[in-house]
């Protein structure tokens, strides 16, 4: 029987500046969802990558004094290393300067043109290089783009236009479906904007610029970056003929930040409709991160380097904090003091101490050999109940609540140790057997969130691998535990 497929994507990142904590949050939350579905035995394809054809990249390369291609090559590698450091389990890393991507971008442009839904006209208006988008006067505050706080440039030039206006009713139908945009408030924003403003034809090319994908029917023009960038979700699958495309498209979920909601839930579906391609099933719009309550900004000097944080506290500490502290469907705050509190309390005390106590007692009382006790049905039921809750939360894209449910079981196990007192209880064989099995299952449950820690737990439990969700039930495990280093060192908070 064929595995159920699950295709998940993140937004692709501009490479004009190094990755920051916001990039880390999106990657980690998508990775946790991808890993969870793999643990369920599904055929997962997880895509991330870099957006390299934007004018902001060309501008940054010029300021850096190097060629644009060399600049994006260097910076794309930084983003890839960043993903690897954070243990992001992507299946493909797409770069939009790759030939496989350029070819599909041009193919989609040509297909829509041949459908008579792209035409040549003249664009007159304003363009924000931060958004890489043509914007309206209504979107300005003090003559600056609200999103990027920069003054847009005025443009008056020949341009190809996509007949976005022709898709107003179709788009309204698509975005009105409750399942298409999560959470509800992001869906309501888009529905309201489409109803109030309507859809206007979209400029999809720029004239006489050096950087970008040439328009296939007129190479004086380059393809507008959003038409080009959005296509990555199908170019990485080898649209239209590759077996990966036929297996995985449509995407089960696009994971994006709220600043690019419009592009993913209005422009992208309209382009797909025009090209006669199925729409993605869901767009998950997460919030933004602030730092100590303030918006992340270079001018404020509060840009957080996630690699420095992970070097200081550990990759899994950072992953856990982002997933547990930040409400998955709202804005959230990165606060180092709060991170230390989560590290010392939930990671070191709840999880690390539980493992240390159980392994120590099995070593002391049974020579390290896992005891052969009787299953405690109440503890096993609690495991099942918390897993079911967590699974439902993942399905609803409420990752923070899924982590909370898993930790609910960990806290139950700590209470179990304190209540049963195996160090003075004549039934310690049963007690430590159940605690061992609970920890084996905890290693499975935490794997999507803190994968390195999951593997360390399995190793101390004498297991060769972590296992998947099919193994979330108590059984007779034959193993010898290995007392290792503490999972998490406590840290004294210093401002």
Image (cartoon, helix red, strand yellow):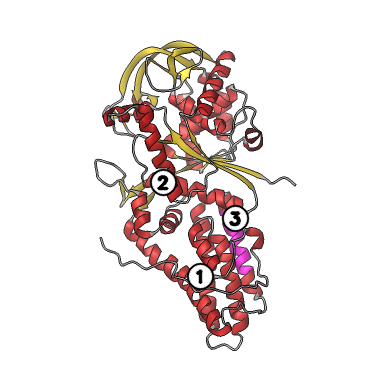
Please tell me which of labels 2 and 1 falls first in the chain: 2
**Residue stretch in magenta:** 381-393
Give the number of callouts.
3
Badge 1 crowding class, 10 Å Cα cut-off, few under 14, some 14 to 19, many 20 or more, is some
Badge 3 crowding class, 10 Å Cα cut-off, few under 14, some 14 to 19, many 20 or more, is many
User: Label 1, on which residue?
Assistant: 411
Residue 34, numbered circle? none
Residue nearer the viewer, 99 or 143: 99
Q: Which mark's residue is nearer the viewer, 3 or 2?
A: 2
Classify 485 as above or below 245.
below
User: Label 2, on which residue?
Assistant: 82
**Residue 79 location (% of width, % of height):** 41, 41
Label 2 to label 1: alpha-carbon separation: 32 Å
Residue 391, numbered circle? 3
Classify 284 as above or below 381.
above
Q: Secondary structure at mark 1?
A: helix
Magenta-highlighted stretch: main secondary structure? helix
Label 3 to label 2: alpha-carbon separation: 28 Å
Q: Residue at x 63, y 73 (%)?
A: 378
Residue nearer the viewer, 154 or 23: 23
Instruction: Tell me, yes or no, whether the two marked residues, 1 and 3, touch with CB atoms within 8 Å.
Output: no
Label 1 to label 3: alpha-carbon separation: 18 Å
Q: Residue at x 66, y 34 (%)?
A: 243
Does residue 139 appear in this view?
no
* Horizontal side, residue 20 vs residue 358: left or right: left
Please tell me which of labels 1 and 3 falls first in the chain: 3
Q: Residue at x 50, y 60 (%)?
A: 404
**Does residue 384 show up magenta in the picture?**
yes
**Does residue 84 show up magenta in the picture?**
no
């Amino acid at each position: 029987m064929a595995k159920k497929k699950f295709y998940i994507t993140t937004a692709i990142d501009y490479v004009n500046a190094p990755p920051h904590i916001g990039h880390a949050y999106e990657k980690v939350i998508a990775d946790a969802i991808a890993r969870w579905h793999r643990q369920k035995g599904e055929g997962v394809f997880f895509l991330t990558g870099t957006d390299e054809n934007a004018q902001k990249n060309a501008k940054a390369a010029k300021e850096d004094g190097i060629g644009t291609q060399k600049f994006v090559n260097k910076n794309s590698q930084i983003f890839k290393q960043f993903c690897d450091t954070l243990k992001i389990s992507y299946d493909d890393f797409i770069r939009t300067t790759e030939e496989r991507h350029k070819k599909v971008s041009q193919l989609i442009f040509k297909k829509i043109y041949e459908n008579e839904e792209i035409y040549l006209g003249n664009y007159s208006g304003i363009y924000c290089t931060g958004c890489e988008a043509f914007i309206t006067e209504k979107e300005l505050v003090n003559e600056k783009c609200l999103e990027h706080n920069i003054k847009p440039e005025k443009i008056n030039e020949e341009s190809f236009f996509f007949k976005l206006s022709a898709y107003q009713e179709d788009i309204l139908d698509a975005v009105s479906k409750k399942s298409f945009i999560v959470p509800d408030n992001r869906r309501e924003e888009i529905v309201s904007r489409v109803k109030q403003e309507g859809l206007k034809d979209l400029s999809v090319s720029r004239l006489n610029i050096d950087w970008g994908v040439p328009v296939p029917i007129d190479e004086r023009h380059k393809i507008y970056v959003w038409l080009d960038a959005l296509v990555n979700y199908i170019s990485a699958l080898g649209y239209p003929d590759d077996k990966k495309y036929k297996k995985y498209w449509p995407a089960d979920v696009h994971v994006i930040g709220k600043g690019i909601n419009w592009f993913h839930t209005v422009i992208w579906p309209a382009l797909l409709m025009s090209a006669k391609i199925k729409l993605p099933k869901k767009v998950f719009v997460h919030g933004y991160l602030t730092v100590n309550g303030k918006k992340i900004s270079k001018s404020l000097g509060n840009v957080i380097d996630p690699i420095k944080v992970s070097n200081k506290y550990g990759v899994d500490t950072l992953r856990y904090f982002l997933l547990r502290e930040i409400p998955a469907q709202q804005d959230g705050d990165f606060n180092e003091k709060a991170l230390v509190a989560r590290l010392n309390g939930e990671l070191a005390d709840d999880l690390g101490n539980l493992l240390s106590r159980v392994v120590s007692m099995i070593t002391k009382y049974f020579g390290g050999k896992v005891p052969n006790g009787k299953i405690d049905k109440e503890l096993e039921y609690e495991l099942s109940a918390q897993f079911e809750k967590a699974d439902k939360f993942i399905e609803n894209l409420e990752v923070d609540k899924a982590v909370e449910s898993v930790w609910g079981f960990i806290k139950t196990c700590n209470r179990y140790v304190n209540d049963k007192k195996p160090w003075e209880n004549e039934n310690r064989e049963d007690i430590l057997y159940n605690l061992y099995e609970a920890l084996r299952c905890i290693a499975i449950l935490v794997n999507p969130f803190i994968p390195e820690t999951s593997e360390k737990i399995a190793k101390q439990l004498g297991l060769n691998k972590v296992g998947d969700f099919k193994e979330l039930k108590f059984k007779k495990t034959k193993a010898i535990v290995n007392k290792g280093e503490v999972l998490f060192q406590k840290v004294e908070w210093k401002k």
